[in-house]
Amino acid sequence: MPADGSTMVLPPDFLLEFKGINTYYGDLHALKNVNYEIVRGEIVCLLGGNACGKSTTMKTIMGVVRPATGTVIFDGKPIETLPTSERVRRGIAPVLEARRLFPRMSVYENLEMGAYTQKRGPQFNEDLERVYSLFPRVKERRAQLAGTLSGGEQQMVAIGRALMARPRLICMDEPSMGLSPLYVEQVFDIIQEINRQGTTIFMVEQNASMALSIAHRAYVLQTGMVVLSGTAAELRENEDIKQAYLGEMQVDATAKMSAA
């Protein structure tokens, strides 16, 4: 405590930062001077319409797309020039849009692929048991070809594969896409549990109602620019967000889920 008796306020513990990021596809300016700050231990969701830059954000984090200008900082160090494999080694794992499993490989083999940056040994078995405890259905299907699973089961495997890398940050691109309502609820419950276990999550999600019901904070993108940010509670009450992304029925559902 300072000598004057006041309480010392520590700066936020940022795990991931975008500072002035500009990303292009040829002449198309996809991300325009974008700034994000993801605090360690948070769930942060990224909202926006089609072609606004959400997936480009995830590709920029993973190194699939390189920014023309600006800095991406992970755990205090710039990573914008690093290859994807090195970013995974440092603790970032993706859950890709549309799952992107290896369909002709078994569920177990897909999980093995998630641990390719880790040394095999007791740690691998621990991580595998963690995945199986989170997803009992995945354990039941471990010998089955991944391409024969339902969409919800494939999403569970995709999340499990990311966890096998022992990430500190998971970047999820549309985790509810193509899932039945039952699986959507299960997946979002699991996302919360993974976060409670200590993993930070940055999530792109079209289902704004569900995303804001579990997130701590959110950003809104329009045509490659951040136009709004704040706590999830603030954005749920924002009239522009209600009209653009929620609708009255979804807002009511969000409120009920938050109160549950």
Image (spheres, rainbow, N blue to C red):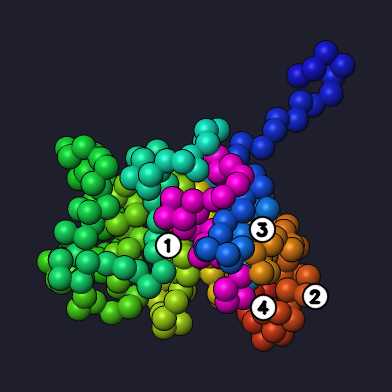
Q: How far is disc 1 from disc 4 in space, using C-alphas?
A: 23 Å
Q: CA distance from mark 1 to mark 2?
A: 29 Å
Q: Which image quarter holds the N terminus?
A: top right
| Residues at circles 1 and 4 in contact by the CB criterion of under 8 Å | no
Callout 1: few (<14), some (14-19), or many (20+) C-alpha neighbours within 10 Å?
Answer: some
Residue reaching furthest front? 27
Give the residue number, with chain letter if any, for mark 2.
239
The answer to whether any part of residue 45 appears in the image is no
State yes or no: residue 112 in magenta: no
Instruction: Tell me the CA gap for discs 3 and 2.
Output: 25 Å
The residue stretch that appears in magenta: 49-74
Please state, as top left, top right, bottom left or bottom right, where the C terminus lies in the image. Answer: bottom right
Give the residue number, with chain letter if any, for mark 4.
245
Callout 4 secondary element:
helix
Q: Position of residue 7 (x, y in %)?
A: 79, 26
Q: For mark 1, give the secondary structure.
A: helix
- Amino acid at pointer 4: Tyr
Kind of residue sitting beneath label 2: Glu
Q: CA distance from mark 2 to mark 4?
A: 10 Å
Which residue is depicted at the point 60% across and 46% down? Answer: 69
